[in-house]
Image (cartoon, rainbow, N blue to C red):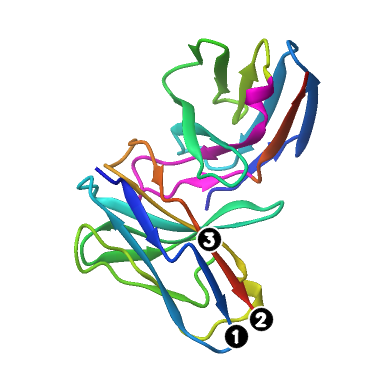
Amino acid sequence: NAGVTQTPKFQVLKTGQSMTLQCAQDMNHEYMSWYRQDPGMGLRLIHYSVGAGITDQGEVPNGYNVSRSTTEDFPLRLLSAAPSQTSVYFCASNSGAGGELFFGEGSRLTVL
Amino acid sequence: GENVEQHPSTLSVQEGDSAVIKCTYSDSASNYFPWYKQELGKRPQLIIDIRSNVGEKKDQRIAVTLNKTAKHFSLHITETQPEDSAVYFCAARDDGGYNKLIFGAGTRLAVHP
């Protein structure tokens, strides 16, 4: 039981490049979400999903796209990376309303 | 939407002292309040949570209190140990909504031997 798995762990991009952060969970959780963590700003919600085929915006969605074609996977796409997107990204999942949020190990992204 | 404020941003205590971290939230519909601990370079992990039908919850050296009228909740750590050094995040969620867990900015706790 791996829990929440994120790849890659580290990535360096140039401004304007695109990439996808992968996230998979094997706990059969309905809910998945993406957060970014910046110094002094805590964890800010980017996008979330309450089930396959359903996604919605969080606090800071601009510049990011998501999709949820299966229960297990919730990729985060940066279509045109900007230096302001330099951050540590965490994927998380939980079993439903009130369920504990389980985080992946994080992905450190640097945009030059 | 929900907004969570957390204070202080940094906290330094001597080993054996108590530590208190406070959070306020804005959405009166929020009814679930977890606390997460993040050690350096690691992922956040849940340490304790409380729901709006409870005023206080304890787990060994950790306790959380909730005042729904004032919309604030606090984390209390007693008999602090060096391994308690970490960043602590509070959060709030409306379980009747769409599972949006909103976090505070975090408190960096340093426990000095």
Q: Amino acid at mark 3?
A: Glu
Which labelled disc corresponds to residue A14? Answer: 1
Looking at numbered disc 2 in the image, what kind of residue is underneath it?
Leu
Q: Is residue A76 left or right of residue B71?
A: left
How many labels, in total?
3
Q: Is residue A101 left or right of residue B74?
A: left
Q: Earlier in the sequence, mark 2 or mark 3?
A: 3
- Residue at mark 3: chain: A
Cα distance in 3D space between marks 2 and 3: 24 Å
Marks 3 and 2: in contact by CB < 8 Å? Answer: no
The disc, 1 or 2, on the residue closer to the chain's N-terminal end is: 1
* Horizontal side, residue B14 vs residue B74: left or right: right
Tell me the chain of label 2: A
Compute the Cα span from label 1 to label 2.
5 Å
Q: Residues within 10 Å of mark 1 (few under 14, many from 20)?
A: few
Say if B84 sits above or below A99 in the image: above
Check if residue B86 falls in the magenta segment: yes
Give the residue at mark 3. A59
Front-lying residue, A6 or B3: A6
Give the amino acid at mark 1: Lys
What range of the chain is rendered magenta? B82-104
Residue B79 in percent (x, y) is at: 67, 10
Q: Give yes or no for contact between labels 1 and 2 (Cβ–Cβ under 8 Å).
A: yes
Q: Position of residue B77 (x, y in %)?
A: 64, 17
